[in-house]
Amino acid sequence: MTAAAEGTAAYREVRKNAKPLLQSEASRGLALVSPTLAFAVIMLLVPILVVIAHSFWTQNYLTVDYTFTLEQYRIALTEPIYRDLLLRSLFISFSVSVLTVLLAYPIAYYISFHGGRRKSLWLFLITIPFWTSYLLRVMSWKVILGYNGVLNSGLLGLGIIDEPSTALLYNSSAVIITLTHAWAAFAILPIFVSLEKVDRTLIEAATDLGDGPIRSFLRVTLPLSMPGVISALLIVMIPTVGDYVTPKLVGGKDGVMISNAIQAQFGKALNWPLGAALSVSTMLVVSAMAAASVLLLRLLVRRAR
């Protein structure tokens, strides 16, 4: 009886101590988020694991050989066509990211520091182009950059060129221009949020200590807004490598990217292992490039101080 009573008392003590823990704000938040988080992780992790598994197999039309091999990675990394496509894709992605951030930062800066009561209106106007279909926006750039498009017609009317130029469309430059416009708002918003968090009194203090507008911007505003810049860079860089619609519509043979080769392997070629190997290789290379870009940005900001 004594042992049973002591066991019951110990159990009650454990329940008593556990009850506040279960009722704590952190526990309730974790219990609320856990199912959604688990679902998101599973939906992200399982497809990635399937792709990685396919990359170690081989396929002969409809027959899949499940024997472990690195042959697909050898092809993906050594074949000149895939290597050139990957390098072109990285160049386009990096160029789009840099151009988008350079164009987005002044806009976000103006809205944050000079927007006044119209900040919400400015943000609303920025999102208006994204009410239309992504394909429609890409096709509109095709009309603008085309042989008889708006830009060529304007240059002819101004007498700058004697005949329409064919260098505006179906090349890497057309892909860069189109993607820069398509991802502009996704870069403006995180930079704007980061600039909104900058303490204005720090800028005033820098001015009182003798810093001019440029120096106070480089030493105060830019470093404090760097999280938004890094976020914008990553938000633009990672998806643009995998974009295959824009290169197909405005890139031509000189604007084809690695994503088009991956889509072809999973589609018409029916070679899923090679497509998976190209996908995994691209993911790893893009991750390394994104990490290097972040480290470089931080280094430049430290030197600017």
Image (spheres, grey):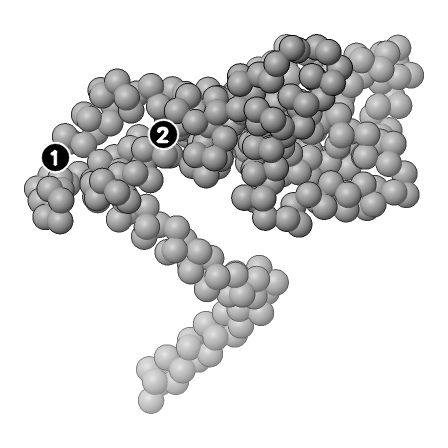
| 9 or 264, nearer to the observer | 264
Quarter-of-image position of residue 5: bottom left
Describe the element under mark 1 as helix, strand or loop.
Answer: loop
Structural crowding at the residue carrying mark 2, measured as other residues with C-alpha within 10 Å and reported as few (<14), some (14–19) or many (≥20) = many
- Looking at the rendered image, the quarter that the N terminus falls into is bottom left
| Image position of 2 (left or right of 14) | left
User: Could you tell me which residue is drawn at 19 percent across and 26 percent down?
Assistant: 75
The residue labelled by disc 1 is: 69
Residue 276 location, x and y as percent? 26, 39
Q: Is residue 177 visible?
A: no
Q: Tag 2: residue type? A: Ile
Secondary structure under badge 2? helix
**292 left or right of 266 in image:** right
Tell me residue 192's x, y (percent): 73, 36
- Residues 201 and 80: in front is 80
Give residue 202's quadrant in the image: top right
The structure residue drawn at horizontal position 60% and vertical position 40%, both measured from the top left corner, is: 137
Residue drawn at 37 percent across, 79 percent down: 7
Is residue 114 in sight in this rendering?
yes
Query: Which residue type carries mark 1?
Result: Thr
How many marks are shown on the rendered structure?
2
Spot occupied by residue 184 in the image (x, y as percentages of width and height): 64, 34
Considering only vertical position in the picture, is 218 above or below 283? above
| Residue visible at 44% across and 56% down in the picture | 40
Name the residue beneath numbered marker 2: 258
Residue 79 image point, x, y percent: 22, 21
Question: Which residue is farthest bottom?
Answer: 1
Using the numbered discs, state the Cα–Cα distance from disc 2 to disc 1 in whole angstroms: 22 Å
The answer to whether 28 is drawn above or below residue 154 in the figure is below
Of label 2 and label 1, which has the lower sequence position? 1
Q: Nearer the viewer, mark 2 or mark 1?
A: 2
Query: Residue 95 versus residue 196: which sits nearer the camera?
Result: 95
